[in-house]
């Protein structure tokens, strides 16, 4: 694609990056076939090619309005288009740059600015978020149905954390900001599985948010402080040689794996950020690497364990991190019966704060996803990201869990024999 970027951005690092991305797009339109918003709305400007065109227009100095903002806001950043694109267009980076410029050009309405501000201030702060959810739960009977359904029910914390100091092998575990409130058992189950493998998982107090939330809401610059703080909290452990950083929320994993790139121009943090990005792995990758020890434990009782399970692969797992099939293989090895899911590449509509900012589209995507997941009547739905888990659970009666809980349960059944 030919480009002629405007003076205000042409000779900046962002301008050069955007220019290279724009030029890599050959305008073939293959990406539209897998774009969830294009499928729902049928408007070229609500698909990747149209959004690329809108960003190009803006960076070339053409006027922008709420119309451009509306079409870019509707993008889920699911990155299905990147998986499909034959030319390797790095759409998410172009969108990042486009959104940052757009925020400076088009002022949002007061109500929306306030909502975004409140989300950015509350959600990444673990205690504040827990308090806000607690208040929401208390007020649920008084709330309108549509709002009440958005307040997740309390989940009993049923797992006891393994005693520390029993193993020589040690890895870091990201606690996260919303997961301890919305799905407290996920990291506890993970710690118990790793304990069976002779690995201690360390959670560092004060680690907090990885920056993904603010990155989605306010752009890359707004997320940098969260990222630097996380690096500072983790660094003493990294320096002492932890083997890996284990992440159970694929949204956080996708963000942390970009730390090196996002902080490459920060002379104080660039090297540390790259080191942390290299150490960070989704829990499915770490357990696959440990399968020599894990599989014999899982396979002892597979004959009696054919529970019907539908797996939802979050976009941040399958499109951003390009991790496919690992959790499913481990569940199958543990004797669960994985059911086929139609259109598995499509987003469920959660997408960070998208379900709050674009509720109509998010609900349609959720309901389509649930119809696909429930088609073969699973007993349980599983996924790999707390946002998808909570969003899907808001639309169905069947339990929606993190897949690691099922692996943990299988190991617990065996140890109680
Ligand atoms: S982003 Fe990729 S698939 Fe989409 S129009 Fe451009 S080159 Fe084609
Ligand atoms: S990131 Fe997802 S919603 Fe956005 S343009 Fe690409 S496929 Fe469509």
Image (spheres, rainbow, N blue to C red):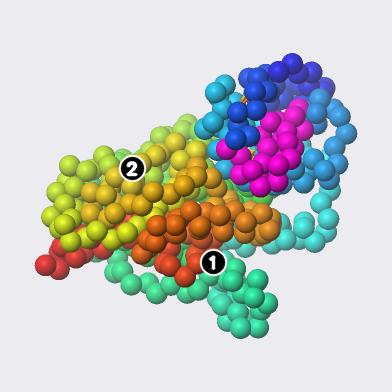
Q: Residue at x 13, y 55 (%)?
A: 300
Is 194 placed above or below 58 here? Answer: below
In three-dimensional space, the C-alpha distance between marks 2 and 1, rounded to whole angstroms, equals 26 Å
Would you say the beta carbon of the disc 2 residue lies within 8 angstroms of ligand 2? no
**In the rendered view, does 52 fall on the left or right side of 246?**
right
At x 44%, y 57%, the residue is: 375
Give the vertical position of 261 relative to 234 (above or below).
above
Dominant SS in magenta: helix
Q: Secondary structure at mark 2?
A: helix
Which region is colored magenta?
34-56
Which is more toward the observer, 268 or 353?
A: 353
Q: Which mark is residue 52?
A: none
Mark sitting on residue 394: 1
**Please, is residue 26 above or below residue 67 in the view?**
above
Question: Outermost residue toward the right?
Answer: 63
In the rendered structure, the answer to whether residue 399 lies left or right of residue 40 reads left
Neighbour tally class for label 1: few under 14, some 14-19, many 20 plus, Cα within 10 Å:
some
Residue 1 x, y percent position in the rendering: 71, 18
How busy is the neighbourhood of tag 2: few (under 14 within 10 Å), some, or many (20 plus)? some
| Label placed on residue 326 | 2
């Amino acid at each position: 694609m030919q480009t002629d970027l405007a003076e205000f951005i042409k000779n900046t690092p962002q301008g050069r990056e955007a220019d290279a991305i724009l030029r890599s797009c050959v305008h073939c339109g293959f990406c539209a076939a897998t774009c969830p918003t294009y499928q729902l709305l049928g408007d070229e400007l609500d698909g990747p090619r149209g959004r690329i065109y809108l960003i190009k227009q803006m960076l070339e100095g053409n006027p922008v309005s709420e119309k451009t903002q509306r079409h870019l806001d509707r993008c889920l950043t699911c990155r299905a288009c990147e998986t499909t694109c034959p030319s390797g267009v790095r759409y998410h980076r172009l969108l990042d740059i486009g959104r940052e410029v757009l925020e400076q050009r088009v002022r949002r309405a007061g109500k929306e600015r306030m909502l975004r501000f409140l989300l950015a201030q509350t959600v990444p702060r673990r205690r504040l978020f827990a308090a806000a959810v607690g208040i929401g739960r208390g007020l649920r009977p008084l709330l309108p149905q549509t709002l009440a359904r958005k307040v997740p029910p309390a989940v009993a914390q049923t797992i006891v954390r393994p005693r520390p100091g029993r193993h020589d092998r040690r890895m870091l575990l990201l606690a996260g900001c919303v997961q301890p409130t919305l799905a407290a058992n996920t990291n506890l189950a993970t710690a118990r599985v790793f304990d069976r493998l002779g690995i201690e998982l360390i959670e560092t107090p004060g680690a907090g948010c990885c920056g993904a939330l603010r990155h989605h809401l306010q752009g890359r610059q707004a997320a940098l402080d969260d990222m630097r703080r996380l690096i500072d909290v983790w660094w003493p452990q990294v320096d002492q040689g932890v083997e890996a950083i284990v992440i159970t929320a694929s949204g956080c994993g996708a963000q942390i794996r970009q730390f090196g790139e996002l902080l490459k121009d920060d002379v104080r943090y660039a090297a540390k950020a790259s080191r942390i990005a290299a150490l960070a792995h989704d829990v499915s990758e770490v357990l696959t690497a440990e399968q020599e020890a894990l599989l014999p434990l899982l396979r002892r009782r597979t004959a009696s364990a054919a529970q019907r399970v539908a797996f939802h692969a979050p976009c941040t797992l399958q499109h951003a991190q390009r991790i496919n099939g690992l959790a499913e293989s481990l569940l199958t090895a543990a004797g669960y019966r994985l059911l086929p899911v139609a259109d598995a590449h499509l987003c469920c509509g959660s997408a960070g704060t998208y379900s709050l900012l674009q509720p109509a589209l998010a609900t349609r995507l959720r309901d389509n996803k649930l119809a696909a997941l429930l088609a073969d009547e699973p007993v349980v739905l599983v996924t790999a990201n707390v946002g998808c888990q909570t969003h899907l659970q808001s639309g169905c009666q069947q339990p929606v869990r993190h897949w690691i809980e099922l692996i943990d349960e299988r190991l617990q059944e065996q140890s109680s024999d």
